[in-house]
Amino acid sequence: MRFLLRAFLGLVALIVLAGVGLFFFLPTDRIGQIAAERFEAATGRTLTLTEGFSPSLYPTLGVRTGPITISNPDWSDTPNMVTAEGAAVGVSLLPLLSGQIEVEELTLLNPVIALERDADGRANWQLTPTGSAAEDTLSDTAAEAEPSASSGPALTRVNAQIVDGVFSYRDAASGAAHLMDDVNARIGFSGPELPAEVSGELTWQGQEITLAATLGAIGALLNGEMTDIAARIEGDLGQIAVNGALALSQTGALHSGLVTVSAGMEDLAPIMTALALPPLPASAGALRDVSAEASVGLGESGLESTLTAQIIRDDVPVRLSGRVDGAADWLSALAFQVDMSVAVEGLADASYRGTVDVSDPATPAANGAVSFRSDDPRALIAWGAGTAPDLPDGVLTSVALDGTLKLAGVNRVDLTGLTLALDELTATGSLGVTMGGARPAIRGALATNRINLDPFLGGEGEEQPASGGGASTPGGPAGWSTDPLPLELLRLADADLDLDAEGLKAGTIDIGRTGISIDLTDGVLTARLREAAAFGGNMAAEVRANAGSKAVSLNANLASIRIEQVLLALAGLDRLLADGALTVEVAGDGSSLDSLMNSLDGQIGLNLADGAIQGVNIAQLAANFTNPGAAMEANDRTDFTSAVAAFTITDGVMDTRELSMLGPLLRLTGLGTVDLGGQSLQMRLAPRIVGDLQGQGGNLDASGIVLPVIVRGPWSDVSFAPDLEALPALQAAQDRLRQEAQAAEERLRREAAEAEQRLRDQAEERVNRELDALRNQLQEANPILRLFD
C-alpha cells in the first residue's frame, strides 16, 4: 500500500511539475529529471523515462510519457520491478488554480509488475525513502522553486486505471509462483472524506476473475484511521466477500481492524490447478461445495479470529469451526492459540485446543488438548481411504480418544495423559507416532482393562459347557477355524509398547492381571507376557508372529496351575483334573488356525500331582477286564498322586516320549499320539495293579498285574476300552498265576503239617524231660519214695 501511495504521489508530482514547467517554460526533459529525482527520494527506487513528454494544457493539464521503468532492489536478479509502455496523467486546470488537485486521468499502459521475495524473506515492494524526503515526496523544493506538499494543492479527486497489465509473484523460499495477466483495473474517489471505488478484471492461472471494492474514506485510511471496507471477488473458481473495517500503520502495513471474509466454490479441482498444485489423488474423493466464513480482528493486543468452513467430500459434509488468536507479535512470531473442531457428518468428531507455532515451516510445533470420537470408524476409514478395511467382525467398531497432543515437526506426534476407548478396550497412558518411514512407528505405555482377542481370532470364543466325552473344542465340531488369521494387520505399523492389562482373553483362555511388552517391526511381532495369574496358577509366555512367512511360535511356562483349565481352554478336554506345571515350546506356520495347528512342531512337558481322570475307573476296568462290554458310569474316576508326561510335536501330531502315573495300588505308563490338527488321540495305557498303597514317591516299577487300556477318538468323544489284543496273554498269565498259587498253597500246607509235627514231637520230648527231672528231684528229697522206684 505504501508503494502504491508513493508511486501515485510521485506521478502527481510529475503532473504538478509539468504544469508549473509549462507556465515557466521549463524544458520537458528537465521536468522528467525533476520527477525522477523526487520519485527516487520518496521510494528509494529509480524511475526511468526513456522518451520525452507530450504535454497538454487544456482542457486538462497533463502529460503522456513513453516507456517507463521502476527499478528493483540491488538483491534482485532482475533489474526492474515495474515496466510499462507509458503513462498518461491529466488534472483539471481550474481546480488546480484554486489549490485542489483533481486527477481526471491516471493511466498506466501495459504495465508488467513483478513482485518477489528472496530466500531471506526480503520483499521488493518494501520501499526505503532516501534523504529528507523519507516522509514527504513533495516537500523539497528544487531550484525551480517547486511548492511543498504541506503548502501545495490538496488531492481531492482521482480517476486512475491500469490497462492490460501483468502481475507476477515469486517466492524463492517456498518456490511458489503466481501470474495474473490481462489486468484491467480502475480506482476513483471524489474527495478524501468520500468512498473510493475499485473495480477490475484479470486472468489468474487461466481463470477469469472480477473485483469490486469500496473503501469508506481514502483520507482516513491514509491517515491511519479505521476505515470501512467492502469487497467482492468472483470468477469461475468461486467467490470471496470481504466486509469490515481496517487501519494502516505509518509504514503502510495493516495495523488494526475487524474484517469478515466469506468464500465459496463449487469445485476444488480448478483452484488446485490455478495454484499450480498437483491433482488430488483418487483417494481424496470428490470434493465440492466449499464454503468458509472468517472474522479477523487486529489490534494492539494482537490477532483475534474465528472461522467456520464446510466442504462436501463424497457426499459427506465436513465442517470446521473455531478460532485462532495471536499475541501482538503474531505476524513475526507466527505463534498462535488455536481452538478448532472438525466434524465429519455421521462419522467422526475431533477437536484441538492449544498452541501452534509455524515460525519454522519445516518443523511446525503444537501443544494442546486433543479429542477424537467415532461411532463407526470402519465407515470413516472406508470414506477416507476409498476402501473398507479388511477386519474381522467386532474389530474397530468405536473409537474415543482424549489427551494432550505434542507435535514436533511434521513427522512426530506424542499423546500424553491419554484416555482411549477402542471397542471394549479402555486404556490410559501415553502414545507416540513417528511418520516418515515405511510405516508409522508407534511407541508408548498403556494401562488397559481386560484385553479381548476373540474378534481377531475369527470368533467370540465362548466356552462351551462340558458334556459326556468332553467339552467342545475351540474349532467347533468341524475342527479348527479356517478363517484367515489377520496377520496382515502386523504390516500396518511398527510398535514398541508396554501394556499393563487387567486381564487377557483369547478364546477360552482367560488370564488375570499381567504385563505385556510388544515389539512389532516390519510385520514381525514379539509379544512377551510377564508373569500373570492364569489357569488357577501363574503363567509367563512369549508369542512371535510373522506376517510375511505366516510363522507363529509360543513359548510358555505355567506353574501351580489346574491342568483341566488348560486342557479345556486349548483342546476342549475336561477329563484330566490335577495341580501341576506345564511347559510349551511350539512353532508353526499357516494362514488360518486350522493350517497353523496342522503345522506345529515342538515339545510339551507336564508334571502333575493329586489328580484324577474323570469318566473312567481303571481299577474297575481291570476287574471287568474279561468283560470289556461292562458299562462305566459318568462319575467314575481314577485318582492318582503324581503324573509326568513329555511329548514331541511334528506336523501337528504329538508323540509320547514319557507318560507315567502313580497312585495307591496303581502304576500307569503309556505311549501313543495326539493329533492336534485333527483333534483326536490314540493312546495305549498300561495300568498296573500293585500291592503298594503309597502313591507319590512310590516305586513305579513295583510288580503287579498289567491291564492295558486303549484310549482313542475325537476330543469331543474320547473312549476308554481294554486292549483286547492283550486278553489271551493276560488270561495265560492269570492261569499261570493260579497254578503257581495252587502249588504254593500245597507247599504251604505240607510245610505247615511238617512244622506242626515237629513242634508236637519237640513239645512231647520236652515234657518228658521235664517230668523225669521232677521225679528225680522228688526221690532225692524223700527216701521212702525211692523204695517205689
Image (cartoon, helix red, strand yellow):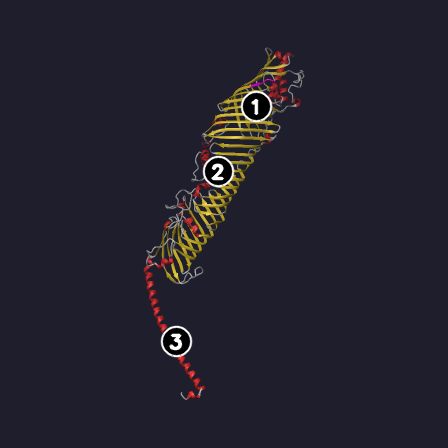
| Residue 147 at x, y percent in the picture | 66, 16
The answer to whether 612 is drawn above or below residue 460 in the figure is below
Separation of disc 1 and disc 2 at Cα? 42 Å
Q: Which residues are magenta?
A: 193-197
Circle 2: element type: strand
- The residue sitting at the left extreme is 728
Location of residue 198 by image quarter: top right
- Considering the image in quadrants, where does the C terminus appear? bottom left
Q: Secondary structure at mark 3?
A: helix
Residue 759: assigned label? 3
Residue 425 higher or lower than 746, as above or below: above
N-terminal-most mark, 1 or 2: 1
Q: Which residue is mark 2?
A: 399
Q: Is residue 542 left or right of residue 243?
A: left
Evaluate whether residue 558 shows in this view: yes
Position of 100 with respect to 169 (left or right) is: right
User: From where the camera sits, is residue 107 visible?
Assistant: no
* Disc 1 target residue: 244
Residue type pointed to by label 3: Leu
Residue 97 at x, y = what percent? 64, 12
Q: Nearer the viewer, mark 3 or mark 1?
A: 3
Mark 3 to mark 1: distance in Å? 139 Å
Seen in the picture, residue 637 relative to 460 is either above or below; the reply is below
Residue 6 in the figure: left or right of residue 705:
right
Q: Residues within 10 Å of mark 3 (few under 14, many from 20)?
A: few
